[in-house]
Structure formats: C-alpha cells, structure tokens
C-alpha cells in the first residue's frame, strides 16, 4: 500500500483523512476542497490550489485554500493556455516532473518519479519571465505536482508561499502520494459521472421507445419533445412522408403534390421568408444532396452561419438564437422515411481571467504573460459530443422502426377491415353457440371449483335464461316418496315482471304415471304453444299456474333414477324452439346430472374422510393414553419393587433397635457398677475413658438410638405410602379410602411443597369408595402437581392448596383441589381437557395429564370433573364420583 511510503505519523494521518473524504463524499468538488484544506494545514503554507486544464488548454482554479488571507483568492479564475506552455505540459506528462521554485534564490528545481531509482532534485536558474509571473501573484516560493489521468494531464496541485521556503523531499513524496490518491478519486468520480450519463441516455431512449412503440398509437409529437429535451436542444423537427403514416397530410404541403409530408415541430423554429422557394427546410437541395444513400452519416453543424451549404437558409434563422443543428436521416431498409432535426441555441459565456484588478497591492505589478480582463463571449455553441451523436443515432433508429411498424400496422388494419365484414356474419352465427358453450363451461367450472350444488344450480339458471333469452329457467326436484307426483322448485332465474316461483310446491297427479318413465329414459319435451298442444289436463293446469306459453323440459338424473327436471319457460308468448336450443338444454341437463352425481360422491367422500379423521384422532388419544398407562404401570411396578426391597432391611433395622437399646442400657449399667466398686481405677482405664469421652457417650448414645428409631419409622411410612400409591393389587374396582390416596400423593410431592407452601385439608367422614385406586391416585397427582406449578408462577405471601372432600348425595362424593395461584384465562380454561393442549413451555408439559384425568373420572368412574378459575385469584378443580359403581 502507498501508505507504507509515508514516514511520519502526521503524514499518515493526513493520508487517512483524505481517504475518508474520498469514501464519504458525493462529488469530486467536495474531495478537492477537503484535500487543499488538509494539505494547507499540513504544510502550514499560504495557498494550496488545484488547477484543472480545460479542453481548450486553458485552466481554471477549481479548489483553493488560503491561510489567513495572506494571498488573494484565485478560486474560479481562468488562466490563459500560454501561462503553461506546451513544452512544460509535455514535461509534466512524460516525466511527471515536480516543479519547486524559490524566488529568493532565483532557482527552479525539478524532480521526476522513478520508483526503481529515486532522483534528486535538480536545480537551475529561474526564468525571469517566470519569476515576474510569480511575483505578480505575491508568491515567493512554490511547488507544482502534476495530476494525470492515464496519459493526459488533468491538472496541477500547486502550493504557494508568500515568503521564501524550502520544501523537503519527504514533503514532496507525501504530496505525491496525495496526488496519486487524487488521481484514483478523479478516475472514480469520472466513471460515476459517465455511468450516470449513460443511464440517463438509456432512460431517455427507453422513454422515447415507449412512446413510439405503443400498440394502439404512435406518439410522434411526444417522442419528438422527449428527443429535444434529451439532447439539450432548444427545438426540433420531425419531417415524415405522409404515406409512411398512412394518413392524409394536415400540416404542410410540398411543392410536389406527389410528395405530401407530415411535419412535427417542438420548441424554437426558423421562420421561412415569404419569398422563399420552399416552405419547408427539408425540401431544400442541401438535404437531398447530403443524404443520397443509407450509408450517409449524421450531419452535425456546429455553427449554421459558418456552413456554406446552408447559406440560403440562414435568413430563416435570423430571428432565433439557433446556431447548432444535428440532422439524422430516417432510413428503413434503403427507404428514406424522413428526417429528424434538433436545434441548439447560441450561449453566452463569461470568463474571469486570472489577474483581475484587485485592491490587493500584490496584484498591481505589471504582467506580460497574461492580461487581466473579464470576457463576455456571445455566439458560443455547445458542441455535439460523441455521446450526443450516439444517442441521436439510436433515437433515429427507433423513429425509423416505429414509423415502418406503424405503416405495417395501418396496412394490416385496412386488410382486417375487409375481413371484418366477413367475420361479423360468421361471428353472429357462432355467438349463440359460443354463449351456450360458455354456460356449459360455467357448469363444469363450478363443478371443479366446489361441487356446491346450490351454487351450480343458481349459476346455470341465470346463465341459461340470458343465453336463450327466455322468461324463466328453473330446476324442479321430485319428492321421491310420492311417486314423482309432487316436488318443489329449488333454483330459478326469472325475468321481470313475471313472478318468481322459487320454493313453490308443485303437484301433478298424472306425472308419475304418464311421464316419469319417459323422462327417466332420457326424453326431452318441447312445447311451442301450450294452448294449442294436446296435454293432460293436470299437466296443463300446472303450466297455466305459472303462466307458461312455451317450454322445454329435460330430465336430471342421479345415477339411473330420475331426480328432477330442468325447465325452460317462455311466458309472454308462444315460441318455436330450434333444434340447437333443444340440444343445448339437453347438454345442460346432462351436465347437471353429472354435477349431482359428483356432489353425492363428494358428500360420501367427505363423510368417510371425517370418519377417518375422527378414528385417527381417537386412535392417537388411545395410543397416548395407553403409553401413559403403561408408564404409570411400569412406575407402579418400579415403586412396588423398590418399596419391597427397602422394606426388608428397614424392618430388620427397626426390629433390632429395641434390642440394641436394651444391650446398651445393660452395658452402661455395668460401667456404672464398676465405677461404684472401683472409684479409683488404674491410670490406663482413666486415660482410655478420657480419650473416648465416656461421659458424653453415656449421655449421647440413648439419643442416637432414639433418632435411629424415628428415622426408620419415617422410612417405613414413606415405603408404605409408595406401596399404597402404586396399588398394584387394585387393578379392579375395590373399596378404598380416598383420603389415604390423597395423603400418599402429598407425601410423594412433599419435596415440591417445601416449607413455604401450606396444604389445608378439610376431609369429611366418607365411606369407602368403589374405584380404581391407582387411577384415582394418578388424577390426584396431576391436579396437585398443577396446583404446585401454579403457586410457583406467582409471588404470594402465603401460597396455599386446599383439599376438600364431602358427600353431596347418598351415592356421590366430591373432591375439591383449590389453589391461590394466578388463575387460568377463559380462552385457556375452555380447552384444558383437550388432548395435547398445554400452556407450559417445551419439556415441562405434554398436554395429556388433564385429558387422561378427565377420561379416568368421566369414562372409567362415571363421574364429572370441572374447572373453575378466577384470574389473579386461583383455580379450583371439582370432582364428583359415585360411591358405588352400579
């Protein structure tokens, strides 16, 4: 990295700050301004400026920093090209020479850049003209470092001092690194500007293409306006042969009637003199002579008053500010379609040349290499750049393609107009058939969507009525329990003002005997005039009931049975039904029959699916309960086995404690007798008595034996509770004391209750209960565990659990477990007995404890269990079971 070449820490910090400016700045001017300020403060010089070369080889100060106004500002001033002669610029490019001037010693030094062999600064006498030039600016010493972009001299980094000053090689190398960094930054911002300009050109081109390639119209005027704007023009013209647009000319007529044209104008336009031979610019010979073939390039005119070919047209532009033109021929496959022209106005520029008169006395020295003046330039023209020509060429291609496509489109429209008359006649014949097929399609679509038979019937009746233009279409369903003689209208589409018949019950005593079998075999009936037809009186009465003048009736079958009828009614007049209409109604009735059968199959499938889902759910619950039961059974066996194994040694210990107490008492009595008979025992006995602390043993040994007896008694109680809780001998209904089961459960949960939770038992005098003791113990375990969990989640001064039992009926008892925890919200309480529903975190609850408890109480013991909860106050579980199972 170039930072490694900076020896001093301040230089490294300078380099880092400038890099930060480059990274966070949005434009180059910010970077340059920050750089000159950082360099000026680093060198403590009087002026730091960045000088940029312009395309005409003049230069402008684009960034400047001055210390305490020791020198006048040159920011924004332009320097003549002669100030830095060509040989000096060439030297800057070839050797990247750094120029160091010391006016007091009249010397100028140059240092080139050669990384393989560093070169010392070579000094020579300073040119008097150069010395006078610097003195005129008040400069006594200076340092100039070139800024290159590839092989081009972009500008200079210039350091000025109002007093003589020596610049070290280390400072020069530091500044060179800064210049190298600026070179990268300038290249970076140049690429960004080029990318933005390219994106803008592409956006403009896409916008113009969108206007030109519209499917319905060709927006030539709008596209021309966008073209003028995209090229920074002041006006523009689009001259197109009217034949290409396939329209009558309505703008301008040429001198040659066979060459009628259409002209579109935008912005500033020339004014043709009254005595001009042609009314349009594009008709002059300059255009014809210039563009003879498709290979002729774009015509760019920097200044029309300097273009001899446009001498005859110059009077037309006198009244405008137009000076520049670009003219593009619109070719398409060797056919000239027209011309695209864009104008640019002359621009007025103002240049402030360096050395402008200033009250500062240092600016009053005579200057011979430049003259101070403010120049206002009129008649300047913005040149047509390569990017402009590339863009206008692409735009012209879009115009050519769009015009040709539009012409083709117009020709196709003319051809289509001739075909349209033929198509209309055929379309009229097909419309009815298409509409009828659409009705069938709607039926099939509704069948595929949902098979909701009511929706299908409603859709069909409305669509069929509109398609046939009849007064009523209805679907009639038979009452199969009455031999097809009665039924009801279940769907209808009716045209006002005829009354609706939906829901009407119909009775025709002769239908079942006379017509049912015929319709079941697929008969379709059509009546053109009810009054003139030979019908059964009962059938005629039904038709007259609904004011029917003509009808088509088709069967709707479900399987092989006649389910109903599709009825089409004309109520305002008789009607001669066509074969196509009868066939169409028949097709609709067949589709309705299919829909009816599929709906029935769907209903059966849904029922089977619901049964399977219910069976699967039951199986899952049963499987879970079996697993839980097996776990409890295994746990019971384990508990019983452990209790048995512990019970034997405990009974042995418990049984021998009394013997040990008796033996110990005898031994202590014997020792006391010895002490009485031998008050002065030998010294060895006294030493051993002191060593074992005989007096303490005589006092503590009875206490130890008493503690052993209490501990073994406690173990025997726990073992007995475990055996009673497991209840391996209670797999069937037996009479048990449920208080014993509750107490055993509390004993097992004693480690969770601790000393800070109080259990209040309110037992009533209950008879023995006929039950599955082990299963009821499991219920007590689940309820008490949940109560302890609830107390752990709240901070109560006195967390309590109340256990209450009572006999509420001669053959029914109640067990209540209540806590003063946080309670259960209603939306949770309503689901707590659902399998796998839990509000506990993963790993703490399975959601099956209360579900199994519910099944044990309700299904196994024919009882009931309910949850009563008050949020923030606690929860109560109320269990009722019979005393005797009947």
Image (tube, grey):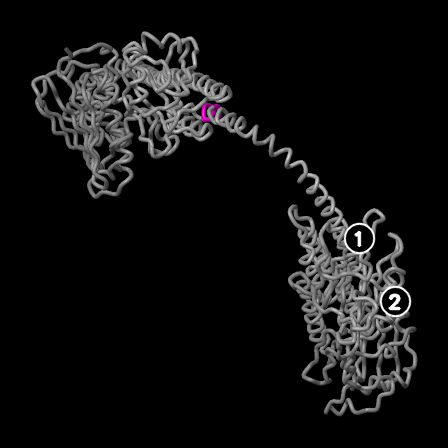
Q: What's drawn in magenta, residue-wise?
A: 444-449
Observer-nearest of 224 and 629: 224
Q: Position of residue 878 (x, y in %)?
A: 18, 27
Side of 214 relative to 740 (left or right): right
Q: Residue at x 32, y 9 (%)?
A: 512
Q: Kindly identify which residue carries mark 2.
A: 93
Q: Kindly identify which residue carries mark 1.
A: 337
Q: Residue at x 40, y 24 (%)?
A: 574
Q: Is residue 870 above or below residue 64?
A: above
Q: Is residue 754 within the magenta segment?
A: no
Q: Is residue 254 above or below residue 613?
A: below
Main SS of residues in magenta:
helix
Side of 16 relative to 128 (left or right): left
Judge whether residue 335 can be spotted in this image: yes
**Of callouts 1 and 2, the N-terminal one:** 2
CA separation, marks 1 and 2? 50 Å
């Amino acid at each position: 990295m170039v930072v490694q070449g900076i020896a001093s820490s301040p230089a490294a910090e300078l380099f880092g700050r400038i890099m930060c400016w480059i990274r966070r700045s949005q434009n180059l001017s910010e970077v340059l301004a920050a750089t000159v300020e950082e360099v000026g403060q680093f060198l403590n010089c009087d002026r730091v400026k960045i000088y940029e070369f312009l395309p005409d080889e003049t230069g402008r100060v684009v960034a400047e920093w001055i210390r305490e106004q020791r020198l006048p500002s040159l920011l924004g001033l332009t320097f003549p090209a002669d100030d830095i002669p060509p040989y000096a610029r060439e030297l800057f490019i070839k050797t990247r020479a750094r120029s160091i001037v010391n006016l007091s010693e009249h010397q100028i030094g140059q240092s080139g850049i050669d990384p393989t062999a560093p070169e010392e600064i070579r000094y020579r006498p300073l040119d008097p003209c150069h010395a006078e030039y610097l003195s005129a600016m008040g400069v006594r010493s200076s340092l100039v470092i070139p800024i290159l972009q590839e092989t081009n001299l972009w500008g200079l980094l210039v350091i000025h001092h109002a007093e003589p000053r020596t610049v070290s090689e280390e400072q020069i190398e530091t500044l060179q690194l800064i210049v190298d960094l600026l070179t990268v930054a300038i290249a970076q911002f140049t690429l960004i500007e080029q990318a933005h300009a390219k994106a803008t050109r592409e956006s403009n081109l896409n916008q113009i293409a969108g206007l030109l390639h519209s499917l319905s119209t060709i927006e030539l005027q709008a596209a021309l306006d966008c073209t003028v704007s995209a090229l920074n023009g002041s006006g523009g013209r689009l001259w197109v042969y009217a034949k290409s647009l396939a329209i009558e000319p309505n703008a301008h007529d040429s001198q040659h009637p066979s060459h009628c044209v259409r002209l579109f104008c935008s912005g500033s336009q020339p004014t043709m003199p009254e005595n001009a031979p042609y009314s349009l610019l594009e008709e002059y010979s300059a255009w014809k002579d210039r563009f003879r073939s498709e290979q002729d390039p774009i015509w760019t005119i920097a200044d029309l008053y300097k273009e001899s070919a446009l001498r005859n047209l110059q009077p037309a532009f006198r009244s405008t500010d137009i000076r520049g033109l670009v003219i593009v021929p619109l070719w398409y496959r060797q056919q000239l379609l027209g011309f695209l022209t864009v104008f640019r106005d002359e621009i007025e520029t103002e240049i402030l040349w360096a050395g402008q008169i200033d009250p500062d006395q240092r600016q009053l020295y005579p200057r011979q290499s430049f003259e101070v003046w403010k120049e206002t330039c009129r008649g300047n023209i913005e040149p047509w750049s390569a990017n402009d020509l590339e863009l206008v060429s692409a735009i012209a291609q879009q115009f050519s393609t769009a015009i040709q496509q539009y012409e083709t489109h117009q020709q196709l429209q003319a051809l289509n107009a001739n075909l349209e008359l033929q198509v209309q006649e055929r379309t009229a014949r097909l419309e009815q058939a298409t509409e009828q097929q659409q009705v069938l399609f709607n039926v099939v679509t509704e069948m595929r969507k949902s098979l909701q038979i009511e929706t299908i019937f409603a859709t069909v009746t409305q669509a069929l009525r509109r398609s046939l233009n009849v007064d009523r279409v209805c679907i009639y369903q038979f009452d199969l329990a009455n031999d097809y003689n009665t039924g009801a209208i279940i769907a209808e589409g009716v045209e006002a003002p005829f009354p609706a018949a939906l829901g009407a019950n119909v009775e025709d005593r002769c239908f079942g005997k006379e017509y049912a079998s015929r319709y079941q075999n697929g008969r379709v009936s059509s009546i053109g005039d009810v009054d003139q037809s030979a019908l059964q009186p009962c059938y005629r009465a039904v038709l007259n009931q609904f004011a029917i003048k003509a009808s088509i009736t088709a069967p709707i079958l479900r399987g092989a049975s006649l389910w109903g009828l599709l009825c089409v009614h004309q109520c305002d007049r008789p009607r001669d039904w066509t074969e196509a209409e009868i066939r169409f109604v028949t097709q609709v009735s067949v589709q309705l029959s299919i829909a009816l059968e599929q709906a029935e199959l769907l209903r059966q499938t849904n029922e089977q699916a619901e049964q399977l889902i219910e069976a699967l759910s039951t199986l899952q619950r049963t499987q879970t309960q079996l697993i839980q039961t097996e776990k409890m059974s295994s746990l019971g066996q384990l508990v019983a086995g452990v209790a048995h194994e512990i019970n034997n040694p405990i009974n042995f210990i418990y049984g021998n404690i009394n013997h040990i107490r008796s033996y110990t008492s005898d031994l202590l009595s014997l020792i006391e007798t010895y002490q009485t008979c031998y008050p002065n025992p030998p010294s060895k006995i006294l030493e051993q008595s002191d060593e074992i602390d005989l007096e303490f043993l005589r006092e503590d040994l009875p206490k130890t034996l008493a503690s052993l007896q209490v501990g073994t008694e406690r173990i025997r109680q726990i073992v007995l509770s475990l055996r009673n809780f497991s209840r391996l001998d209670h797999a069937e209904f037996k009479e048990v004391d449920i208080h014993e089961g509750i107490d055993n459960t509390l004993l097992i949960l004693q480690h969770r209750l601790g000393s800070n939770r109080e259990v209040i038992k309110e037992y009533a005098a209950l008879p023995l209960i006929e039950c599955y003791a082990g299963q009821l113990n499991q219920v007590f375990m689940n309820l008490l565990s949940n109560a302890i969990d609830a107390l752990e989640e709240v901070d109560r001064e006195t967390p309590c659990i109340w256990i209450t039992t009572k006999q509420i009926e001669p053959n029914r008892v109640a067990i209540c477990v209540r806590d003063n925890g946080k309670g259960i919200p209603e939306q949770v309480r309503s689901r707590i007995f659902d399998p796998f529903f839990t509000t506990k975190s993963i790993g703490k609850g399975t959601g099956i404890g209360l579900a199994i408890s519910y099944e044990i109480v309700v299904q196994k013991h024919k009882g009931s269990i309910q949850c009563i909860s008050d949020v923030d106050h606690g929860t109560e579980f109320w269990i009722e079971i019979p005393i005797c199972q009947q």
